[in-house]
Image (tube, rainbow, N blue to C red):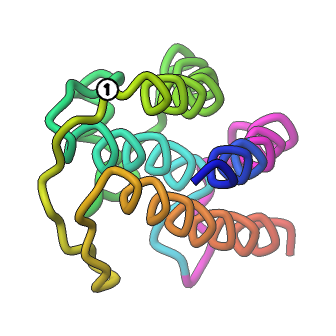
Amino acid sequence: MENLFPIIAQNRKALQHFLAQKTKDELHKIPKGFNNNIWWNIAHIVVTEQKLVYGLSGLALNIPQELVEKYQKGTSPKGEPSDKELKTIAEMLTSLPQKTRLDYEAGKFNSFKNYMTSAKVELRTVEDAIAFNTFHEGLHLGTIMALAKAITV
């Protein structure tokens, strides 16, 4: 378990790199053959961690509901986010995993609702959710890397 938090932090640094290096247009471009963009994948990662870890533990999410509705599983990019939303997600990208770690270490996750992921992995504990979230973020980092390559061709 201890190793997962540093892995998530490294993944989030990689995602921050994309936010820093890509223009707003590049973040929102959907290349041919894709159904989303770099920005949607990053925002989706932020939302998913909250839903898997906090939501399934019966705790309040640390993100606004409107972000959940825009970026949760089953959504797709719709328009461009405001500068305020871009800044909010960029800040949450690093701050929320730190909060999750502190909350985990403080023993705040006392219950958990079992959940079968779309990847057919059953989550039974908050530890399962954190581990699966790490896998999920890796999948989306791979997609982001493919998107970044596709928009520069």
Left or right for 15, reference 67: right
| Residue 139, placed above or below residue 51 | below
- In the rendered image, the quadrant that contains the N terminus is bottom right
Under circle 1, the secondary element is: loop
Q: Overall secondary structure of the magenta stretch?
A: helix
Q: Does the magenta stretch include residue 60?
A: no
Please name the residue that numbered disc 1 is placed on. Answer: 108
Q: Where are the magenta residues, as a range?
A: 13-33
| Residue located 17% across and 49% down the image | 112
| The magenta stretch spans residue 23 | yes
> 70 or 4: nearer the eye?
4
- Which percent across, then down, holds residue 96? 52, 27
Indicate the amino acid at tag 1.
Answer: Lys
Closer to us: 97 or 74: 97
Residue found 76% across the figure and 66% down from its top: 151
Does residue 83 appear left or right of residue 13 in this picture?
left
Residue ID at (22%, 27%): 65
Give the position of the C terminus as an image quadrant.
Answer: bottom right
